[in-house]
Image: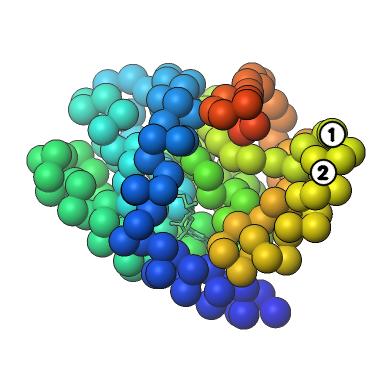
Amino acid sequence: MRALEYKQIKRAYAVMSPMYDLLFDKIFHPGRVAAVQLLGVKPNDLMLEVGIGTGLNLPLYPIDCRLVGIDLSHQMLKKAREKVREYGMNNVTLKVMDASKLEFPDEHFDHVLATYVISAVPEPVQVLREIKRVCKKKGHIVILNHFKSENPVIGAFEELMAPLCSQLGFKTDLKLMPLLKEAGLTTEQLHRVNLLNGWRLVRCIND
Ligand SMILES: C[S@@+](CC[C@H](N)C(=O)[O-])C[C@H]1O[C@@H](n2cnc3c(N)ncnc32)[C@H](O)[C@@H]1O
């Protein structure tokens, strides 16, 4: 079952990669700006971006940090590599990697970012646990995503859409607070961002 989900996600993002920026750059930009700001990056900090995709956040990072970006999809990362070259960023390393099995030691990164990713991964709790593991104590973990609405009508609609959306590579029925609790993360800041304030931006301090 999980293997099938991984296959579906890889296929979905392979298909989507050529048009991803066209579809998702402008509409999700306000959330990206707020998310990178919330990271509180200091000079020379070592950052991890999980599920970096086509690298739309790349120009938002301060140039004096060191960034590692990982993603499951070769095709999405190819687009990110093009941006790294285009922007002449020599502080960025990109790797194909599964976020549920991060190939980094414990407490390796100063801060970790995941934008529009948690609903796209097959194992969201495991991914959050991995993020927590590789982030230094007191480091910032910033998550930006759409989560299931607390409005019963919208929530029911999102449940209804879930099977179709999973074919497209994302979940519409993830609940924020149970997810964070299961992963052992506590919210330090919570904001609503993007169109109709429909996306949630969370900062957890790794404790
Ligand atoms: C909606 S895109 C978001 C991309 C980027 N973070 C952004 O803000 O535009 C979701 C990304 O998560 C990646 N992804 C899904 N499952 C993953 C996993 N298990 N490990 C790493 N990346 C994964 C997909 O390949 C895709 O690039």
Tell me how the rendering is colored.
Answer: rainbow
Q: Is residue 126 visible?
A: no
**Mark 1 surroundings within 10 Å by alpha-carbon count, few (fewer than 14), some (14 through 19), many (20 or more):** few
Residue depicted at x 29% and y 38% = 58
State the mark number for residue 33: none
In the structure shown, which secondary structural element does the residue marked by tag 1 occupy? loop
State the mark number for residue 151: 1
- The location of residue 31, given as percent across then percent down, is 49, 29
Instruction: Name the side, left or right, on which 42 lies relative to 157.
Output: left
What amino acid does circle 1 point to?
Asn
Residue depicted at x 19% and y 46% = 84
Instruction: Name the side, left or right, on which 155 lies relative to 139.
Output: right
Residue depicted at x 20% and y 47% = 83
Residue depicted at x 34% and y 48% = 21
In this orientation, which residue lies closer to the viewer: 198 or 79? 198
Q: Is residue 23 visible?
A: yes
3D distance between C-alphas at marks 1 and 2: 6 Å
In the rendered image, which quarter is residue 36 located in? top left
In the rendered image, which quarter is residue 137 located in? top right
- The location of residue 66, given as percent across then percent down, is 27, 36
In this orientation, which residue lies closer to the viewer: 102 or 161? 161
- Above or below — where is 159 with respect to 140? below
Do the numbered discs 1 and 2 sit on residues whose CB atoms are within 8 Å? Answer: yes
- Above or below — where is 80 with respect to 63? below
Quadrant position of the N terminus in the picture:
bottom right
- The location of residue 134, given as percent across then percent down, is 50, 45
According to the picture, the residue beneath numbered tag 2 turns out to be 155
- Above or below — where is 7 with respect to 204? below
Instruction: Name the side, left or right, on which 159 lies relative to 112.
Output: right
In this orientation, which residue lies closer to the viewer: 5 or 205? 5
What amino acid does circle 2 point to?
Gly
Instruction: Name the side, left or right, on which 150 lies relative to 119.
Output: right
